[in-house]
Structure formats: C-alpha cells, structure tokens
Amino acid sequence: MECCERVRMGDDNENAKKSFTAKQRMFIDSYLVSLNATQAAKEAGYSDKTAFVIGSENLKKPYIREEIERRMAEAMSSGEVLHRLAEHARGDIGLFVDPSTLTLDLKSAVERGDTRLIKKIKQTFVTRTVGEEEQQTEIFEFELYDAQKALALLGKYHKLFVERHEMTGDIKVEDITLDDKNRLDRLANLLDSARKRRDQQDS
C-alpha cells in the first residue's frame, strides 16, 4: 500500500475531487513526456522490478487516465500534432535566408510565423587579435527541426512503411519499449478520447 504525500490537481476539473499521491503525480508528468508507462513509473520512483506492473496498473485507474487525457487535450489536439509534424517535414532553410544578401532574415520569419520550425539558434562572438588590432567575428548556428524524422513519424502513423526485425535470445516484456509509431498512435488515441470526453461534457 502506498504511503506518501498526497497532492491536488487542477481545481477547474472533476479530477480536482480526487487526490493523487506524489508518486502518481510524478508518473502522470513523466508519462505525458514519454508515453511509456514503465519508464514513467521508474521516473516516479518505483523500482525496476515493479515499474512495469505499476505503470500498467496506473493507466487502468480511471482518475489517472482521465487526468492524462485532460492534460493531453489542453496541450494539443491530435490534429495539431500531425499538422506540426507536417510543417517540420516541409521546413525549408530558404524561408530564413535573404536571397539578396544570403544572410539570415529572422525578422521576415517572425512576421510569417515560421519561427516554430526553428529548433536552435546560437549566436557566438569570437574575438581575434591581428597585429595590434582586435577583430570580432559573429557566428550564427541555425538549425531547423529534422525533416527526415518528421517524415518518418508521419509515414509510420499512416502505415506507409513495413519494418521487419530479427529477434533472438530471451525476451522479457519489461525490456520492450515503444517505438515512434506506437508512441504517435497512443498519443493520437489519448487525444481523441480526451476530445470525445470533453465534447460529451459540453453537450
């Protein structure tokens, strides 16, 4: 039996009537990131030996499942997830370059709303001494989200690819982790369930 601090979730939801242990809340937070119940249980502080069973049991508890679906729906709909992946897949470095000077044009990107395609921008100033003079060089590191990875996730979601894996030796259930397709499928299912539940509450 679990014995630890209990905390309250959002006050504007039916789940606020339910109390969660600190570990359950950590499980929910971790699951929303990894969509892997075993990994979420481990990060919540459960042992490696019990993480698989407890993670599975937590997902079967209605109030935990409802809280996960509620937070999923608040974060982003399944359609939004697929739309964002499609945008990343279509990302083009040319959208951020001024063709007349071949330099970065972030102002135009901001005006168009294309900055959501940017994964990283890093600005570095390097100072060199040449003779008796100091020269400063500005270096930009610019990276978009991986288009190939986004395409792979979309392809797996739409079942465009068939993967074959040769597996040998002893296999333990707790050693199997979700691949990207299963994560995306589970995310879409959770979001759809949350949306239907929200629509029923509104009607």
Image (cartoon, grey):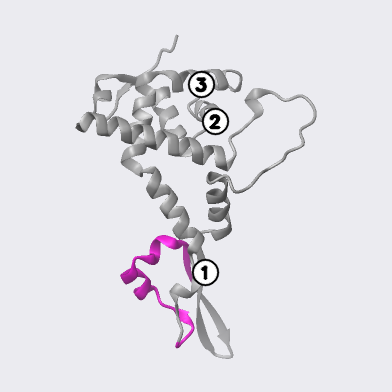
Q: Identify the residue position indicated by label 2 in the image.
A: 39
Name the mark on residue 56: 3
Direction from residue 188 to residue 177 in the image, left or right = right
Q: Secondary structure at mark 1?
A: strand
Q: Mark 1 belongs to which amino acid?
A: Glu
Tell me residue 18's x, y (percent).
29, 19
The mark nearer the N terminus, 2 or 1, is 2
- C-alpha span from label 3 to label 1: 42 Å
Q: Quadrant of residue 84?
A: bottom left
Point out the tag, 3 or 1, that comes first from the N-terminus: 3
The residue mark sitting in front, 3 or 1, is 3
Give me the C-alpha separation between circle 2 and circle 1.
33 Å
Q: Is residue 37 magenta?
A: no
Q: Quadrant of the C terminus?
A: top left
Amino acid type at mark 3 = Ser
Which of the numbered marks, if any, corresponds to residue 52?
A: none
